[in-house]
Amino acid sequence: MTTQTLDASAREAVGSACAQVDEPGAGDHVDGVVPGLVARPADTDQVAEVLRAAAAHGLSVVPRGGGTKLSWGVAPRSADVLLDVGALDQVLDHAAGDLIVAAQAGCRLADLQDRVAQGGQRLALDETVPGTTVGGMLAANTSGPRRTAVGSARDLLIGITMVRADGVVAKAGGRVVKNVAGYDLGKLLIGSAGTLGVITDATFRLHPVPAASRWVSVPVADPAEALRVTQAVLHAQVVPAAVEVGWADGAGTVSVLLEGRVDGVAGRTEATRALLGEAATDSEDAPAGGATYPWDTTATGDDRATALKLTFELSALGDVLAATAGTTAQVRGSAGSGVLYAALPAGTGPDEAATVLDRLRRVCSQRGGAAVVVDAPAAVKAALDVWGPVPALELMRRVKDQFDPDHRLSPGRFVGGL
Amino acid sequence: MTTTEDRPDTAAGATAGIDAVADVARRLLPESGVITDRTRLRTYECDGLAHYRVTPALVVIPEDADQAAAIVRACAEHAVPYVARGSGTGLSGGALPHAEGVLVVTSRMRTIREVRREDQRAVVEPGVINLDVTKAATPQGYYYAPDPSSQQICSIGGNVAENSGGAHCLKYGFTTNHVTGADFITPAGDQVTLGGAAPDAPGYDLLGAVVGSEGTLGIVTATTVKLVRLPEEVRTILVGFESTDQAGAATSAIISAGIVPAAIEMMDALAIEAAEAAVHCNYPDGAGAVLVIELDGARVEVEEEYAEVARLCEDNGSFEQRLATDPAERALIWKGRKSAFAAVGRISPDYIVQDGVIPRTALPEVLRAIAELSSSSGVRVANVFHAGDGNLHPLVLFDDSVEGAGDAAEQVSGAILDLCIEHGGSITGEHGVGMDKAKYMPRMYTDEDLDTMQLVRCAFDPANISNPGKVFPTPRLCGEVPGRHKAAHPLQQAGLAEVF
């Protein structure tokens, strides 16, 4: 753990900018970096005031929503102020007739889903980490099984409010699904890990909750079989909402989610079972693990698994699974999207992790994707190239330099030390 | 590196810059790819928004990315502005040339490099025609979903620049939802890769910023796009109503029932009249409004949804419903809709195609307000729109030979955009801001919003040479005052240019 200290005038400036400022408590650290203080603004204006005070005093700021993914990426070089947006926890507007919802960054995804469910609707983004907030989900760009049919946050976010490092509040997009006026800042902020600005609210496109849903699963004995089954489903006419794979020790399960009308789902369940063969079964329940990652997201410190995100073109599924052979990796993810997650159990040493990462990274990057370390114990992260090669890094650096010229927002958490 | 001179923005300096870029182009391109003849340059003076016309100083037609990059690099070296152009079908003047600049035409980069069913991806060059991607993928059971009405002639490069939509984006989204990777030339002339075949490339989603940036961030020279499985069943229904209110209510009822059709399009009486005159689409007699509703997906579901949609239309007052039972009938239904813009030429010598968005639930109210605007001003407005997602295309009719008619039409057209903004909508749903709507941006966004967007511009194009003057009403100074540099010019700092 490293601890930041702030001088008195900086403390006073942040303290007067915001309704509540606290000394850091036990859980208030960013992957081992303990902030000088925790600011809890009550609204977007106060977020802006905190950021203006931080700018005036040259303080580094790390935004936090639910704090469920704060250890992801690289530990920040500095975190003078932990900016907790947890008090911005409201659903601002659910316009059911327009199929949109607006919510504050600190609003829990589960609360948002409860609210829109009252109108028979849902935000088609899975809760991959229990307790996640809207802001954290966007900043970390999490996605789950349903991305195969409806896409990820970038496909559903239609408007955003952010506060810049200099405290300027800016909006992009709006409240309508179709809108091409101006640059799409929302997409830049998605997955930016709090390094470009602080998200304070977001507006999303919604979908109707389907009347029926059913999972069809089949065990697969080797990588080639997993690929064959996945391809069969994708090219058939069963319109899968998700095609998931779970994998460990050289074998696994492919599971297909069918959603829609009652009769339609019944028919497509039969069709999918026929495609998958005699061993296929169907169930109301999601396969083991559901939409979550194959690691314990509540583990901290050295108890954490080494967590990897693997992306690749769809036809590389077999090669990626094959590359986990002989490792302790638990794999789960969206075979239908080319996104898998792998976990090496806690206790895996840096050398072993590096060997596995290297092998997976080679396959993924040859096949149109990448392998990224999502999270790992400090000693493992220190030994790994967390982000791997990043094309267009220079252009990304210039974007960072424009939005945060002093590199005070979550410094170092992101690619290339940004 | 402390002494710099002004950028060569005098006429003589501009000519020298153009000559230098032309020299580079002549070394690299065949003769037909470099156009300097005044008469031939004029054929490029406008895009689909023909009332803005500027003759470019030079037109180049590169055949590959390396050539295009060398030309952009030459532009950067000599501070010459450039504008990229695909098929030139854009409706906001996004590809309007710069009088002292280069028009980079991508129409000879038109190879479909790969169609990979197993990856559900195609890799295409920017000059490839939208519909040709679908044609290439169809034998494998796939298609390219974004389908602007101009899909038979518009290019993928233009679609990427404008984030084009189309009738089916209600269900399938826009270009930005279907592009996963791009080869890209920065305004400094560097070639970089954004994204790839896989989703979620590490780092900032620069691709997400580039798609829809209307050529202001650089030029895309190849695009990896998603291919979508052809649906098992498609049903297209033409429904006649007495009024737009009824058609709007039916639309809301369909959406409220949890149905997401592939498309719900509406045309009012005047738009129907125009379409009949132009393409004899044989829409229902006496209709005050028609809906074109398309359902697609798995057969059982489409059949069920069709029954429900038919009932909901009837409940809301439809007097005629026609189901297309084969591709020919479906094509005829769509012909009336897709030809609507041009068809308006049959009933009016001149017209403005407007493009605005409102929340779908505001549809009846906004249509009434447009009708009031029309009757109080005496300017006729035909309405054609994507009702499912609230994207209006009012066609404002006028006769330019009548003095003041053009201005009156322009006023009504602008007032319609104000209506959209008042109702929480947007000044453009798919045609882009371009040259035409830059002046409306401050009505939709604050100065801070626009300033923040332009931070992206400054990161990509600090010298402001890539399609300057589009999208933003006033360019942001990227940390320096042109002509009075204290520090080195950004190009110089980046090591891309010596002292000018």
Image (cartoon, rainbow, N blue to C red):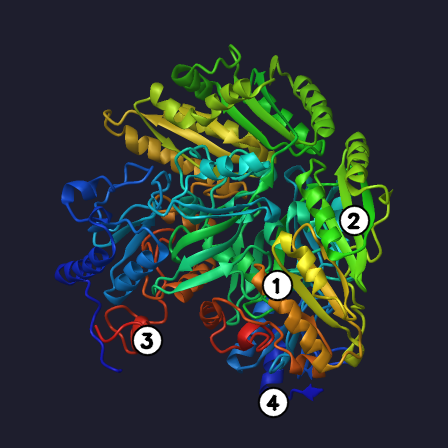
Q: Are marks 2 and 1 in contact (CB under 8 Å)?
A: no
Residue A72 seen in render: no
Amino acid type for the residue under numbered disc 2:
Ser
Q: Are marks 4 and 2 in contact (CB under 8 Å)?
A: no
- The residues bearing labels 2 and 3 have C-alpha atoms spaced at a distance of 53 Å
In this view, the residue in front, B41 or A192, is B41
Q: Which mark is residue B495?
A: 3
Which residue is labeled 4 in the image? A7
Q: Is residue B276 above or below residue A90?
A: above
- The residues bearing labels 3 and 1 have C-alpha atoms spaced at a distance of 34 Å
Q: Position of residue A244 (x, y in %)?
A: 75, 52
Q: Position of residue B128 (x, y in %)?
A: 41, 42
Q: Which mark is residue A255?
A: 2
In this view, the residue in front, A282 or B467, is A282
Amino acid type for the residue under numbered disc 1:
Cys
Q: Which mark is residue A364?
A: 1
In this view, the residue in front, B128 or A13, is B128
> What chain letter is assigned to the residue under label 1?
A
| Mark with earlier residue (2, 1) | 2
- The residues bearing labels 4 and 3 have C-alpha atoms spaced at a distance of 40 Å
Q: Are marks 2 and 3 in contact (CB under 8 Å)?
A: no
Co-location on one chain, circles 4 and 2: yes
For mark 2, give the secondary structure: strand
Co-location on one chain, circles 1 and 4: yes
Image-based side of B102 in relation to A17, left or right: left
Q: Are marks 3 and 1 in contact (CB under 8 Å)?
A: no
| Mark with earlier residue (4, 2) | 4
Mark whose residue sits in front, 2 or 1? 1
For mark 4, give the secondary structure: loop
> What chain letter is assigned to the residue under label 3?
B
